[in-house]
Image: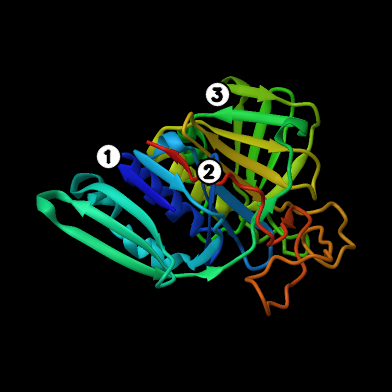
Amino acid sequence: MDCVVTGGNVKVLAKAIHSLSRIGDELYVEPQEDGLALRSVNSSRSAYACFLFAPLFFSRCCVGHTFRCKIAIKSVQAVFRSLATLEKTVEKCHIELDEQKNHLTFTLHCKHGLMKTHNLSFQDSESLQAVFDKDSYANVFRSHPRLLVDTVVHFPPSLEEVTVSVSDERMWVRNHVEEEADQSKAMLTELCLASDEFDHFAVQAHNSVTFCLKELRGLLVFAESTGLPISMYFDEPGSPIVLSVTDSVLEGNFVLATLSDDHNHPESVCWRTCSAAVGGGEGDPGYPIWTVISSVSSSPPTVPDSPVCSQ
């Protein structure tokens, strides 16, 4: 793998990595024929995120043989530590696989000929993917990120979950309060958004879904910095909610668990133990995973004899 990111796209890549750090502790890297996929999943398998960068995002993108790995996401964050000065000082970022040393190398080419090289150790991994179909969701919304940023700013940073309810012409966003909590002492915050504040507002089912706010904040930071509209897809409670940003050269999807209406269920979300496990390679015992996450066989898919390159 040999990829070069230049200009403002370096900051976009850095923002994507920082957004993924809101999801999990590991970054899954998988070069593909249609670009470079960066993924993360949390420890409970209730939140998954993926950014897919098309070959046109890079000034050079060469994918050799099949390669998948995972890296501690904090070590990758350290490469792009100062987001404020990144765009001003870094001219390009070179990402290269060093198979002899088992390193994924990030080289930042800065102004005045300065170069910063980070050699990051990695572990082989299986492909991590989520199974969802955005086109099948009953409720679909799209808006400029500023609308949602101005909405969630009213909730304290310590708030874990929010509830989104919809009707034909309105969306309500409020803080989630557990049923067993003392309602007389709980502080309730609710905001109402009219349909004309959205670029797209399509409701087929009047439902309410509750999900974690932390991951939404992470995607909003990315969407606001890039100016990309954010889309929201959901069905009934207990089914995952999908938050998405799309551009001609990148696509980002955050898939989050929602609380189930089945209050007798021992867990806060719907779970299923899968026979397959997402693991880190040979010797990994695997673990139960949420239905939205699937494991792909570690056997490599068919690839062309020659590398897939764009330049």
User: Quick one: label 2 or label 3, which is nearer the N terminus?
Assistant: 2
Say whether marks 1 and 2 touch (CB < 8 Å).
no
- The answer to whether residue 251 is visible is yes
Q: Nearer the viewer, residue 172 or 268?
A: 268
Disc ID at residue 197: 3
CB contact under 8 Å: marks 3 and 1: no
Q: CA distance from mark 2 to mark 3?
A: 28 Å
User: Residue 39 shows which numbered tag?
Assistant: none
> Is disc 1 surrounded by few (<14), some (14 to 19) or many (20+) residues within 10 Å?
some
- Out of 231 and 37, give the one closest to the viewer: 37
Residue 67 vs 119, above or below: the answer is above
The quadrant of the picture occupied by the C terminus is: top left
Which sits earlier in the primary sequence, circle 3 or circle 1? Answer: 1
Is label 2 in a helix, a strand or a loop? strand
Q: Residue at x 39, y 51 (%)?
A: 2
Location of mark 2 (residue): 52
Are there few (<14), some (14-19), or many (20+) residues within 10 Å of tag 2? many
Which residue in the protein does label 1 denote? 7
Look at label 3 and name its amino acid: Glu
Residue at the spot 56% in from the left edge and 60% down from the top edge: 68
Q: Earlier in the sequence, mark 1 or mark 2?
A: 1
The percent coordinates of residue 87 (x first, y second) are 25, 45
> Between marks 3 and 1, how big is the CA–CA gap?
33 Å
Determine whether the residue tagged by mark 3 lies in a helix, strand or loop. Answer: helix
